[in-house]
Amino acid sequence: MQNGRMQNGKMQNGKFELITTCGNARRGRMHTVHGEIETPVFMNVGTAAAIRGGAGTDDLRRIGCQVELSNTYHLHIRPGDELIRKLGGLHKFMNWDAPILTDSGGFQVFSLAELNKINDDGVGFHSHLDGSLHFFTPEKAMEIEQSLGADIIMAFDQCTKYGIPHEEASKAMNRTLAWLNRCKSAKHRQDQMLFPIVQGNMYEDLRLESLKRTAEYAECGIAIGGLSVGEPKDVMYKMLDVMRPHYPENMPRYLMGVGSPDCLVEGFLRGIDMMDCVLPTRIARNGTAFSSKGRIVVRNAAYKEDFTPLDSECDCYCCRNYTKAYLRHLINADEILGGRMLSLHNIRYLIHLTHRIREAIMKDEYGDFVNRFRESAEYLN
């Protein structure tokens, strides 16, 4: 892994190169202290500094993972960000020498709505582990993220659920912008890139206002939050279409928490550069795999005597060594190896898909790629 490039003796941390475009799709390269990120990129999620399902950092290197994503809230609750700081930061803690992104915890606070109370100062909430009381402010989120030491850190935001009234969405958007100002004031590490987050729920006027005001704080990248929170996909795509002409051109755009195969293809078509999701490992633990022929529910009886690989077009360790029959046995016997193999396969599938997308953009053929993909079984993964 190459470290960020040097220019006049200084690291070009946060530099983004826009290599080429194909329609609205973009092929770029982002520089961080811990390496370059080729975009578009799918980022796998290791919420608590590990991939659920038993994948280690060596596994992630072998399947081509570029960026690891972890979560501020969960690492603060357990084992504690101060402990990780004492051990040299998150890179050393998890033995990962490539780029790391940490979410601020805003979405987790949103997802634990029954445990929290929000005001302009911040969010008070009870731990999902032991019920202990905590209070997150923008300053606290920045303190934790700077202790963790990720390359890319997210501003603290208020995510809202789909379908709330315009007035509530506007209030949350303005609160997120006020918190963003406080996050910027509290950030002092120069080796970290702060991404501000656009909110506004599903209201076009709020999305555009949030994007305009948020872009004023964006120096190395900008994130789009508050989508994939229960709305139909066509509504999400409409919001992306509304915002697309107004993004800053000279930095990456990160669509948060979205990462099914169809959403990757559609998101990158609309000018997004970075996406992440827990989906590949979540469905793997339930015995389900992505494939070039569509989604496969391995535990089903149809695969009891199926001695073919999950996907003959996949180059992962699982597909090169195991059959559907064996994987079905592992999943139904509740063996850890089953979830581990399917997790690595699903992540590799998405990483390879983004590689194909980058190639299509470079060849100026992404429009044709999208049309073929929409007609294929892969779109139904």
Image (cartoon, rainbow, N blue to C red):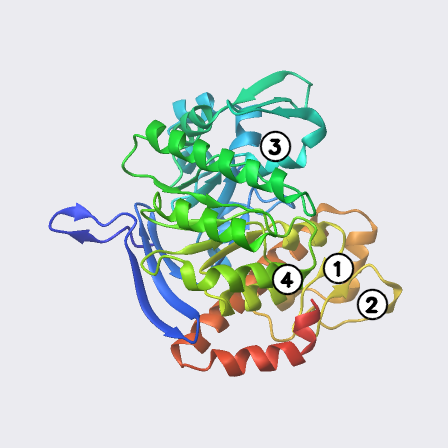
Choose the circle earlier in sequence order: 4 or 1: 4
Marks 2 and 4, Cα distance to the nearest angstrom?
A: 16 Å
Asked whether the beta carbons under mark 4 and mark 3 sit within 8 Å of each other, the answer is no
Identify which amino acid the numbered label 2 is placed on: Tyr
- Rendered image quadrant of residue 177: top left
Marks 2 and 1, Cα distance to the nearest angstrom?
A: 9 Å
Give me the residue at 63% from left, 35% from top: 110
Marks 2 and 3, Cα distance to the nearest angstrom?
A: 40 Å
Choose the circle earlier in sequence order: 4 or 3: 3
Identify which amino acid the numbered label 3 is placed on: Val
Q: Which residue in the protein does label 3 denote? A: 109
Give me the residue at 28% from left, 50% from top: 3
Q: Residues within 10 Å of mark 1 (few under 14, many from 20)?
A: many
* Numbered disc in front, either 2 or 3: 3
Viewer can see residue 8: yes
Give me the residue at 63% from left, 52% from top: 228
Asked whether the beta carbons under mark 2 and mark 1 sit within 8 Å of each other, the answer is yes
Asked whether the beta carbons under mark 2 and mark 3 sit within 8 Å of each other, the answer is no
Q: Which residue in the protein does label 2 denote? A: 303
Choose the circle earlier in sequence order: 2 or 3: 3
